[in-house]
Image (cartoon, grey):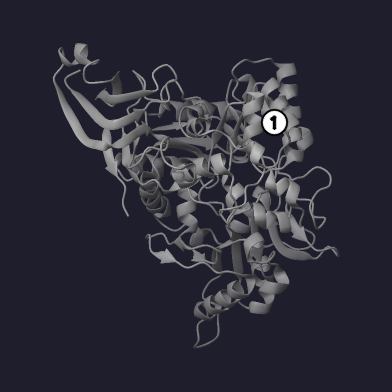
Amino acid sequence: MDKLTVFTATRIHTMDPGRPQADAVAVSNGRIVSVGTLESMQPWLRRTPYEIDDRFLGRIILPGFIDPHTHLRLSGTYMSLNYVGPIDSTDHLGQPLSGLPDQESVISRLKELVAKATDSSDGTTKSPLVAWGYDPGMQGGHLNRDILDAISTETPIWVVAYAPHIIYTNTPMIKKIGVDENSQIHGLGRDPTGKLNGWFVETEATAVAARAVRNQVYGAGFGADSLKLQGQVAVNSGVTTTADMLYGTHSFEEEWDDHSKAITNGSLPLRMFLVPFEGSLRRRYGENFLDFYQHMASQASDQLAVHGVKFVNDGSYPSMTLRLNYPGYLDGEEGLTGEVPWEDMFDRMLPFWKEGIQIHSHANGDETIDMTLNTLKALQNAAPRFDHRFTIEHYCISTPAQARRLSALGGLASVNPYFVHYRSKIQAEKGFGPDRAEATARLGSLVKAGVTFALHSDYNLVVAPMHPLTAVWIAVNRLTTDNKTIVAPGERISLDQALRAITVDAAHVLNQDDHLGSIEVGKHADFTVLDEDPYEVDPKTIKDIRVHGTILAGEFHPARA
């Protein structure tokens, strides 16, 4: 070590249970050398040249926040499209966009966009109208072919929901996509008579629908622009590590190159783990997926690596396409499975399981969680493994019995808690009923069962921010949007448990807790700097603590207003 940099702060919360607090942390070559006080680290300071960096005196340092389930590149892509979502957002340049409160205002906005998309001189359509962000729960129910045909029967209209498990189209768009009533595609929507209703639901069908607008959605340079925008969003939220849980849906090579370039040029100050989508992996590489892994592993760096594999096994919570056990949906809907038939799930997961590749299984509804647990049990019976870290992603609607079973099978959970605040009142009336909506994200049950879990945002593919302190605030308080009503109070967890779920426990879920997640000797020097101490503020104000910036490998990145 040529030199040490010693960061001091009012308080450092290490998330190391043996040494939970410190006043200083010494860093060299991007890694932690010593943690404690200036006095305790004197044996290092007497031997090595050092400088004291005291710019964070008066502030609080924690391990860098980890959001283990995001979609930064894809999120930025959608943000360049016409926005019709229910909440205020930003475009791909960071400019503000106003939300639309209901379906009527969405229809009005689409009519305006159609008018602009038509050449007024001869009435011909320039190109399909492509929009994103529609939310059936918040904006008054699903769109469909008839609603969009009433806007235009000339201009193709393509609208992807905020949770992009559904794409809504009109008749001209259906024709442009090239499907009809005889098409056999998993997730191709139909009305009771068998007529196409304009829906394309889940990965197989949405992939088909996307081909017709590929040039508009995936324009030149879109990936790099997306990551540049989202890199600053992450810093503003205190995030230093994340995992893209849908790697390869566009192009494995292009997605890797975009992330690599963004990291190299400094526009993505994060550690990124790219988790391949199993459907894309099979379509591209077939049974030779291990060759892909070996190739990508050889390119890994401290900031970019391929990790695990992702299965998508049901729909979305906000778009109301997940799978539920009895009594099901309020209005008799059924939701949809992923493109892999559940009866084939064991055979599809087994090769990854045997090779020791960590499996991340998307399961929003309790019926899907049952299937996932049954598959995990079958995998354990076929080839017993310890420390497999099989992770259920989202884990939105579950039961205490499922938490105990997940613990018994040695599994983990990566939970989206944001829906408790942002969606529970909506979905109680539209979708799942009050019992399931109120008990969304049963974190207390996971704690009681002894399951290690993380908190994630799924940003920006659901109507919620990427803001770990907000996730903590929700997990600790479980307040609905009125900021008064507490839902399922027994599922609240302690502040310390919640902070672990965005630091060291999130690192465990990504199989990185030997390198990340706590401020310990030898780990990466990744920190989040806060203006206030979350352990000392009123629990109802945790989300309002200002993030001052992040430190990645010892380098400070300031947050911006």
Name the residue carrying label 1. 348
Residue reaching furthest bottom? 121
Instruction: State the image coordinates of residue 64 (x, y, percent, origin top left).
Output: 39, 34
User: Would residue 139 appear left or right of 190 to someone viewing this image?
Assistant: left
Instruction: Look at 81% across and 48% down and name the residue there.
Output: 328
Q: Foreground: 130 or 245?
A: 245
Return the x and y of residue 98 as percentages of the image width and height.
47, 68
Answer whether residue 361 is visible to the viewer in this image: no
Residue type at mark 1 is: Arg
Instruction: From this view, report whether residue 160 is shown above or below residue 360.
Output: below
Q: In this view, does 155 lie to the left or right of 472?
A: right
Decide: is 92 above or below 305: below
Q: In this view, does 201 lie above or below 140?
A: above
The outermost residue toward the right is: 193
For the question of whether residue 14 can be seen, the reply is yes
Q: How many labels does the image show?
A: 1
Question: Image quarter for residue 542?
Answer: top left
**Quadrant position of the C terminus in the picture:** bottom left
- Foreground of the two, 112 or 484: 484
Question: Residue, x 73% and y 55% (percent of image)?
Answer: 431
For the residue pair 249 and 466, the one nearer the viewer reads as: 466
Image quarter in which the N terminus is found = top left
Is 238 placed left or right of 380 in the picture?
left
Does residue 212 sit above or below 53 in this rendering? below
Q: Which of the 4 image quadrants contains residue 136?
A: bottom right
Q: Please state the horizontal and vertical placement of residue 81, each as a whole percent of the image.
A: 49, 63
Percent of width and height locating residue 268: 35, 43
Crowd class of label 1 (few under 14; some 14 to 19; many from 20; radius 10 Å): some
Q: What element carries label 1?
A: helix
The answer to whether residue 8 is left or right of residue 118 is: left
Q: Residue at x 53, y 52 (%)?
A: 464
